[in-house]
């Protein structure tokens, strides 16, 4: 349970685009889990009943927000049998049966805790086995266990044979079927909806297949109308200009991954009349494909078809990110965690890749993972910044993350809605990290 405390003599990273650091601050957290006061330490006294944690030389930043996560696997390379199309019906039957659902629930709980201990205090899941993340979100909200804020999607919505189908998707080809699937997720408690607008990389069967349009614009429009009527944002997996523009015309609120932009795409990001708020945002996922093209296939285990598709998708995504930055389109951050070579503790690496490959400055990358993501997900009045009145979702590090995101590898403290996690730790995969460190 939260208790009143204060972080004294800390350097506060605001998460703005300029990389502002407020020196020698005291951040006071109330017993209700919100930040009650903040100011220069010389001018602010926490008050009676507060535990004072003196942290000179340490840095406090907003809790990280992962806007694109999966929680069904741990990020190690998948066993080859999972990619076997002959075995797919048996695998699907098991994962959707009682034993599989219990397995997914355990994995979800473990992976959520891993992200929290690495500094992620808000997670939007975008493609679940079924409704295990909805259940985990409910358990956290009830106070059964400490956890991050979860925004679960349930299964993504795909066409027959499309991206994510059938393992993590509800399938429907017509507008009526797509709308019914969106309603099914909303009725089960989903707080986000995800569409597979195009084919993807990992399930591509031919070179050039990733990015092929799948769900029709009419079907996506029906999904957006259903979700928006419930006040729920819609994300679209889209990896080609054709897929992106159709999804934006349909009214999706976030484009996941992205592609090179046409003038129409740029205009629709800024002014999207069918979206819930009148604008849309881009959430690139650098970790999802970069390892597949930067590491040897003997290490990744992917086919030449997957690798070739990954190369094409990365090139398109990098062009899209560059155009988004040039046109002041809101850019967020998502890791695509659970995919091959994307462990749940490596959110810091997404920020590192964003700066080294995506053209974002360190300040802009941190902004994407905090202030921008909060706005993109519609939770900016609740979290995303270090400010009085917002939830005490915070990370404390010994070094300045803006001088190197490895400072986030071992946070000193993680605070989730005022609950203090001291010396948080995670299970790491040394063999995976050693390979990723070569990129």
Image (tube, rainbow, N blue to C red):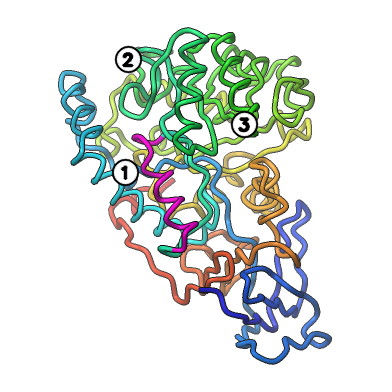
Residue, disc 2: 205
Q: Secondary structure at mark 1?
A: loop
Residue in the image at 58% along x and 65% along y:
417
Crowding at dot 3, Cα within 10 Å, few <14 / some 14-19 / many 20+, comes out as few
Magenta-colored span:
128-143
Crowding at dot 2, Cα within 10 Å, few <14 / some 14-19 / many 20+, comes out as some
- Numbered label attached to residue 73: 1
Q: CA distance from mark 1 to mark 2?
A: 22 Å
Q: CA distance from mark 2 to mark 3?
A: 36 Å
Could you say where residue 423 lies in the image, as x and y percent from the top left?
Answer: 44, 76
* Residue 269: quarter of image: top right
Does residue 242 appear left or right of residue 425 in this picture? right
Could you say where residue 336 lies in the image, as x and y percent from the top left?
Answer: 46, 39
Does residue 203 appear left or right of residue 69 in this picture? left
Circle 1 or circle 3, nearest the eye = 3
- Which residue, as the protein is rendered here, is positioned at the far right? 43
> As rendered, which of 190 and 439 lies closer to the eye?
190
Could you say where residue 202 lies in the image, as x and y percent from the top left?
Answer: 36, 26
Crowding at dot 1, Cα within 10 Å, few <14 / some 14-19 / many 20+, comes out as many
Going from N to C along the chain, the mark reached first, 2 or 3, is 2
- Numbered label attached to residue 230: 3
Circle 1 or circle 2, nearest the eye = 1
């Amino acid at each position: 349970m939260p208790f009143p405390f204060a972080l004294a003599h800390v350097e506060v990273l605001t998460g703005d685009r300029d990389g502002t650091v407020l020196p020698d601050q005291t951040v006071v957290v109330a017993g209700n889990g919100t930040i009650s006061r903040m100011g220069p330490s010389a001018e602010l006294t926490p008050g009676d009943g507060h535990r004072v944690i003196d942290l000179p030389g340490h840095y406090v930043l907003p809790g990280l927000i992962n806007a694109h996560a999966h929680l069904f696997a741990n990020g190690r390379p998948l066993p080859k049998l999972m990619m076997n199309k002959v075995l797919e019906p048996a695998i699907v039957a098991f994962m959707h049966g009682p034993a599989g659902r219990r397995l997914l629930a355990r994995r979800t709980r473990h992976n959520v805790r891993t992200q929290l201990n690495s500094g992620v205090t808000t997670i939007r899941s975008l493609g679940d086995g079924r409704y295990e993340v909805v259940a985990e979100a409910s358990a956290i909200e009830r106070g059964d266990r400490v956890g991050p804020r979860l925004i679960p999607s349930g299964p993504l919505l795909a066409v027959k044979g499309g991206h994510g189908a059938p393992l993590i998707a509800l399938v429907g080809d017509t507008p009526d079927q797509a709308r019914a699937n969106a309603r099914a997720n909303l009725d089960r408690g989903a707080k986000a909806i995800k569409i597979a607008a195009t084919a993807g990389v990992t399930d591509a069967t031919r070179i050039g297949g990733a990015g092929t349009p799948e769900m029709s614009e009419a079907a996506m429009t029906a999904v957006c109308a259903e979700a928006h009527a419930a006040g729920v944002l819609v994300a679209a997996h889209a990896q080609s200009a054709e897929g992106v523009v159709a999804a934006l015309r349909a009214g999706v609120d976030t484009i996941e991954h992205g592609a090179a932009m046409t003038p129409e795409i740029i205009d629709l990001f800024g002014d999207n009349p069918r979206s819930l708020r009148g604008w849309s945002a881009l959430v690139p996922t650098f970790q999802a494909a970069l390892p597949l093209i930067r590491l040897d296939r003997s290490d990744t285990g992917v086919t030449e078809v997957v690798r070739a598709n990954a190369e094409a998708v990365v090139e398109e995504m990098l062009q899209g990110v560059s155009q988004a930055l040039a046109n002041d389109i809101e850019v967020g951050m998502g890791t695509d965690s659970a995919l091959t070579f994307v462990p749940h503790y490596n959110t810091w690496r997404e920020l590192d890749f964003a700066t080294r490959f995506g053209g974002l400055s360190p300040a802009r990358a941190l902004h994407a993972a905090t202030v921008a993501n909060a706005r993109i997900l519609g939770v900016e009045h609740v979290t995303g910044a270090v400010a009085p009145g917002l939830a005490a979702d915070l990370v404390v590090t010994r070094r300045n993350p803006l001088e190197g995101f490895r400072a986030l590898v071992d946070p000193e403290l993680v605070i989730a809605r005022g609950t203090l996690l001291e010396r948080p730790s995670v299970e790491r995969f040394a063999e995976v990290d050693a390979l990723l460190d070569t990129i």
